[in-house]
């Protein structure tokens, strides 16, 4: 078959090379040139990092990489590589990773995204402000992006689900190590409702004090603008705000009580020039988004673990029945029954006698 750019990006992604080093190398060499030259012409370990260099040499095997991707498929995890990122996420200021792992509807990264972030220790006012803003934003063609953390992030995702909108959760961990663990159920709800959970980290990577700040650049990178609802003096949401400014995104802040410690950071952002977010209309007007409301779905479809597996496989395009049997590792009789049920739910469409795609 031959090595493709997609496979090379995957190879870079699993090696542990930092996005900064990878982007520096990719500014000088094409992906295929890196594949061909590493270990021969490219021997400067410092350009890769010692551990990453060793991993790249060790993993430079097409069969190994294809088997690794097959294991991802078996876990219901897909990935998208840098060359398929939307323009906003791919820009140099984001310091984009070479790939992102995901579950759910990857097409959402190409929609009009707005980041909503804030402190974990939010007040009742912060919760109410989040619900009001997000609920109203969901009346328009907007996707809400947040970080699945406690506090404002959780309320932003839940408000979106309640309003029948679409939301993207950007993790500071791998997809098999959801953090905080108490939000595992929320991550499943997001995927089941047609949303997206996404991360740059390997599936079994656990969160740490570095990964949460690091993932914040992806939240702002996906977004046209970022709203800071509530943030204390040293809130992690202020890191996202800094990234938004570096990436030339419109930064919004919700005015807060001047006596509240939870609003010190967000009020300071307003003093420094952030746009006041008093309503969804304020946000949409600043971003030049149409106020045209979209029709709200009358129902949301929940997927069980087997339906989700089929859904993830079909995200990459239509498949014939035999291919689905192999990819899903499922008995033909069980798969036939499952596909029939998913057709009835309007999730899957049969194009020909044995060709299936997402409806």
Image (cartoon, rainbow, N blue to C red):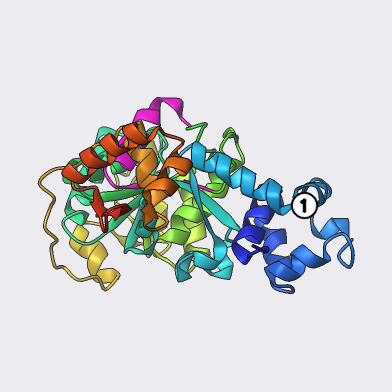
Quadrant, the C terminus? bottom left
Q: Residue at x 45, y 67 (%)?
A: 86
Q: Does 34 lie within the magenta span? A: no
Which image quarter: residue 98?
bottom right
Looking at the image, residue 138 lies above or below residue 191: below
Find residue 40 and report its horizontal and vertical position in percent.
89, 64
Q: In the structure shown, which secondary structural element does the residue marked by tag 1 occupy?
A: helix
Q: Does 193 lie within the magenta span? A: yes
Q: Residue furthest front?
A: 353
Quadrant, the N terminus? bottom right
Q: Please report the bounds of the magenta region as a residue range.
A: 179-199
The residue that disc 1 covers is 56
Find residue 159 and report its horizontal and vertical position in percent.
23, 42
Report the side of 117 relative to 89 (left or right). Answer: left
Comparing 273 with 216, the one in front is 216
Q: Residue at x 75, y 48 (%)?
A: 59
Q: Residue at x 13, y 43 (%)?
A: 299
Find residue 213 and report its horizontal and vertical position in percent.
55, 45
Comparing 211 with 199, the one in front is 199
């Amino acid at each position: 078959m031959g090595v493709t750019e997609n496979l090379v990006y995957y190879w870079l992604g699993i090696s542990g090379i930092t996005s900064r080093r990878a982007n520096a190398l990719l500014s000088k060499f094409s992906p295929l040139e890196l594949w061909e030259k590493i270990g021969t012409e490219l021997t400067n370990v410092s350009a890769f990092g010692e551990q990453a260099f060793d991993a790249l040499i060790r993993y430079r095997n097409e069969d190994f990489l294809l088997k690794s991707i097959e294991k991802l498929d078996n876990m219901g995890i897909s990935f998208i590589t840098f060359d398929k990122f939307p323009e906003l996420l791919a820009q140099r200021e984001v310091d984009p990773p070479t790939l992102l792992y995901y579950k759910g509807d990857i097409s959402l990264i190409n929609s009009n995204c707005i980041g909503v972030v804030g402190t974990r220790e939010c007040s009742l006012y912060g919760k109410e402000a989040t619900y009001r803003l997000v609920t109203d934003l969901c009346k328009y063609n907007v996707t809400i992006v947040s970080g699945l953390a406690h506090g404002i992030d959780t309320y932003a995702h839940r408000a979106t689900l309640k309003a029948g909108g679409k939301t993207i959760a950007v993790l500071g961990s791998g997809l098999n190590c959801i953090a905080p663990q108490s939000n595992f159920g929320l991550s499943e709800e997001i995927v089941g409702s047609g949303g997206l959970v996404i991360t740059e980290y390997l599936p079994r990577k656990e969160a740490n004090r570095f990964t949460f700040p690091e993932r914040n650049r992806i939240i702002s990178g996906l977004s046209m603008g970022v709203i800071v609802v509530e943030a204390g003096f040293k809130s992690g949401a202020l890191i996202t705000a800094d990234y938004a400014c570096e990436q030339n995104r419109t930064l919004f802040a919700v005015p807060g009580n001047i006596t509240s410690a939870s609003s010190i950071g967000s009020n300071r952002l307003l003093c420094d020039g952030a746009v006041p977010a008093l309503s969804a209309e304020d946000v949409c007007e600043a971003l030049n988004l149409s106020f045209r409301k979209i029709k709200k779905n009358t129902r949301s479809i929940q997927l069980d673990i087997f339906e989700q597996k089929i859904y993830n496989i079909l995200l990459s395009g239509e498949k014939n029945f035999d291919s689905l049997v192999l990819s899903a590792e499922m008995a033909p009789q069980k798969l036939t029954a499952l596909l029939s049920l998913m057709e009835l739910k309007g999730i899957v469409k049969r194009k020909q006698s044995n060709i299936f795609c997402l409806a």
